[in-house]
Amino acid sequence: MKKLFSLLLLFCILEANAQDQKNYDAYYTNLPVQMQKAVLPVFPDYEVNINAYGAKGDGLTLCTEAIQRAIDEVSKHGGGKVVVPDGVFLTAPITLKSNVNLYLSRNAILMSTPNKKLHLDPKNPKGRCLPLIAAQKAENIAITGHGTIDGNGAYWRPVKRGKVSDTEWNVFKAMGGEISQKGDLWLPFNLKGIENIAETALKEESMRQDIFRISKCKKVLLQGVTIQNSPRFHVHPLESQDIILDGITVRCPWNAQNGDAIDLSNCQRCLVVNSIVDAGDDGICMKGGTGQSGVEKGACKDILIQDNTVYHAHGGFVIGSDVSGGMENIVVRSCRFSSTDIGLRFKSGLGRGGYTKNIFCYDIVMSDITDDAICFECTYIDKTATYQEGSYQKPETLAFAPDFQDIHINNIVCRGCKNAIRSVGLEGLECVKNINISNSSFFYLGKDINVDAYSKIDIKNCKFEGLK
């Protein structure tokens, strides 16, 4: 009888998962290009609570070991759910294992400890710190529920004086820290009660890390949770397959340096739906690595982005700046961008360019866009908070020049932007070609079309209206 009950339970689990998979498969209808569907992870019906392993949600107790023991136990058991109950749980970096679903209850906050020494990578203590949540070569992993993961980013991020009010600036100064000679930059070095982990403020600034960073994983689900206030990027899968991001909220202050929300790097079969982004840097961004190493890691391919809202971000949907591995079969549709710097942003530069193929962006509404509704830029340079003009040297080779082509943009409605369409190419190179923009309308404050002679963009059936 017990064996029969176990078989029935397993059957019910498989049936429920099959229905969930069907629900996600339903997004892949009426697509302009054929693509492979993202596959949902499956978890056994087994559950543990981190409190049973010694965790305390009092906001004071360091719970890293308790959380990691719970994850390890569930993984060894064959998989299941690790529950983070209501409370504030301080933690240093943890590692997700195969077949583990980390579940956060509605009033659970998993918060990064401000003790920077606990974030050092023991294998490379002078390099970049460990992500708050990491996984490598894992399969069937998830973070679900309705709780919050907080990266405590204020202890890590530099702050530009021109991006904060006097009151905010004084709050940062009260934390301690170091101010540049010009008085235009605050660095979280020599903070009160926080031990430094590097010899200089600039070195420590380069060590900050992402909240969720996984590498070479398969069947990954993030659903329902809020991920916020990262030291650097928030959600960052690399070289991974079958990624589903559903109904997540990714947020940080608008002026958070390098505060990318969702970055998919050299990933395949990804679905991003029903999510909200409000970030300090790029919103939903595709990255393909730089140079030959990017090529070896593979293209961003078979990616569907639908029914998402992006508030503040440097770009609502972004390709680049690292594109060398290539971008193929990407559809962005039925999304809303409100108060982003740029709506659709395609950026790259010499040494980091790569091909684009079958890129479709349509049925997108935008409002209050600070700069360009649609932008192609082939002269992009990464600039950190400490960037010095003239410190960047262009690569001597043109092997990885930007190559934006086969991009189709249709039915865009933008009410409020500086420029409707802008493109900056490279003299002597065809970096922007076979781009179609059609059946769209723009209300602009600056220029309608600001496209240079090196860019080939076909604009049809579009309406432009500016201030008179």
Image (cartoon, rainbow, N blue to C red):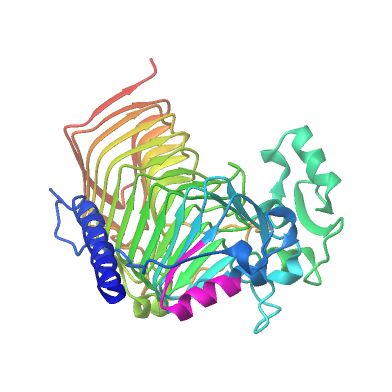
Residue 439 lies, in percent from the top left, at: 18, 34
Residue 404: image quadrant is bottom left
Q: Quadrant of the N terminus?
A: bottom left
Residue 201 visible in rendering: yes
What x and y, as percent, mark residue 182?
80, 49
- Point out residue 295 in the picture as x, y percentages from the top left corner: 35, 77
Majority SS type along the magenta span: helix
Image side of residue 260 versus residue 391, left or right: left
| Quarter of the figure that contains the C terminus | top left
Furthest toward the top, the residue is 468
In this view, 39 is above or below 443: below
- Segment tinted magenta in the rendering: 68-82
Q: Residue at x 78, y 33 (%)?
A: 167
* Quadrant housing residue 45: bottom left
Answer yes or no: is residue 209 visible. no
Examine the structure image and report whether residue 224 is included in the region drawn in magenta: no
Q: Quadrant of residue 344?
A: top left
**Residue extending farthest bottom:** 123
Q: Nearer the viewer, residue 7 or 361?
A: 7
Residue 366 position (above or below residue 87)? above
Can you give x and y, in whole percent of width and height, for residue 323 in the image? Answer: 37, 65
Along the viewing direction, whichever of 59 and 273 lies nearer the viewer: 59
Q: Nearer the viewer, residue 165 or 51?
A: 51
458 or 232, which lies in front? Answer: 232
State the residue at coordinates (79%, 45%). Answer: 172
**Relative side of 211 to 179, left or right:** left
Image-based side of 74 in relation to 217, left or right: right
